[in-house]
Amino acid sequence: MPEGAASLDTALERLYSAPLSAFVSERKAIARELRTAGDRDGARAIEKTQRPSVAAWTLNQLARRHPRALGAFLDCVDRQLAGALEAREDEKRALAQLLEHTREILESDGHAPSRTNIERITRALRSAAVDAEARAALERGRLAGDPEPGDALDVLAAIAPAAASSSPKTPEMPKQAPKDRPKEPRKPDNAFARSARAHASRSPADVEDAERRAALQKSLAELHAERRALAARLERIDDEIATLDRRLAELKTEV
């Protein structure tokens, strides 16, 4: 990595790690330091860096402070997009853990963990999880704004019909049928049954489109998994290079 790019990357890491309340002042300080060091391009790039929204900043801190918890949530999303409906319960547990961390992060910078903030952060998290560009920024802890929800969220909801968030209704007692007339079997009324009826009412074109989108999302999930593996491999290589550089510097001082 060129020296200028390396210094800019380090500067961005420092900037996105800063408290949101200090983002603007930190941005000015970093740009000034880069300009003093002769890196004018880096200074201009830092000055153009957008201040994140509260939701984006919180998600960035989740990625930096709790990468394993975030990775567990993203894995659950990928598994659902690949067709594993049982991953829905795992996703709910992973999300609950992330939201606990979210409240701590919000309070650490003076932001209220209000219902509005939590809902906005949850929506941004789900949107980023199924958008390739936003997800890459999230995994690096460099989201600038709230990702826009896309079609993938609809696919995710469609392949996990059991994810209905409403509480189950108390079943009504069946009315006593007349003795001379056989009782009609009650139609099942649960999430799976409703999904099946809705599926049956769709036109062949709608079904084909949904299947095509589900296949695309499965491919996307597989690519995300491959990308994470490559990123982890690259990180290990970077660590090895840094170790070799330190050893080389030590040897130079001994010569």
Image: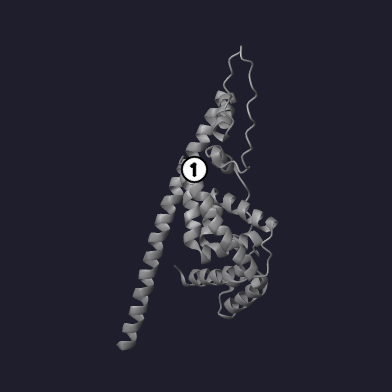
Q: Is residue 66 visible?
A: yes
The residue positioned 34% from the left and 87% from the top of the image is: 253
Observer-nearest of 237 and 84: 84
* Residue 107 screen position, x and y as percent: 64, 68
Q: At x 64% / y 22%, what residue is drawn?
A: 176
Q: Is residue 47 visible?
A: no
Expressed as whole percent of the image width and height from the top left, the position of residue 4 reads 50, 71
Quadrant of residue 125 within the rendered picture: bottom right
Residue for badge 1: 81
Give the quarter of the figure containing the C terminus: bottom left
Q: Residue at x 61, y 53 (%)?
A: 122
With respect to residue 58, does 78 lie above or below? above
- In the rendered image, the residue lying farthest to the left is 255
What secondary structure is marked by label 1?
A: helix
The picture places residue 182, in percent across and down from the top left corner, at 58, 15
Residue 100 image-quadrant placement: bottom right
Render colour scheme: one colour
Number of marks drawn: 1
Residue 181 image point, x, y percent? 61, 13
Residue lying at the far front of the rendered structure: 179
Location of residue 57 with respect to 215 vertically, above or below = below
- Name the foreground residue: 106 vs 244: 106
Q: Residue at x 63, y 29 (%)?
A: 173
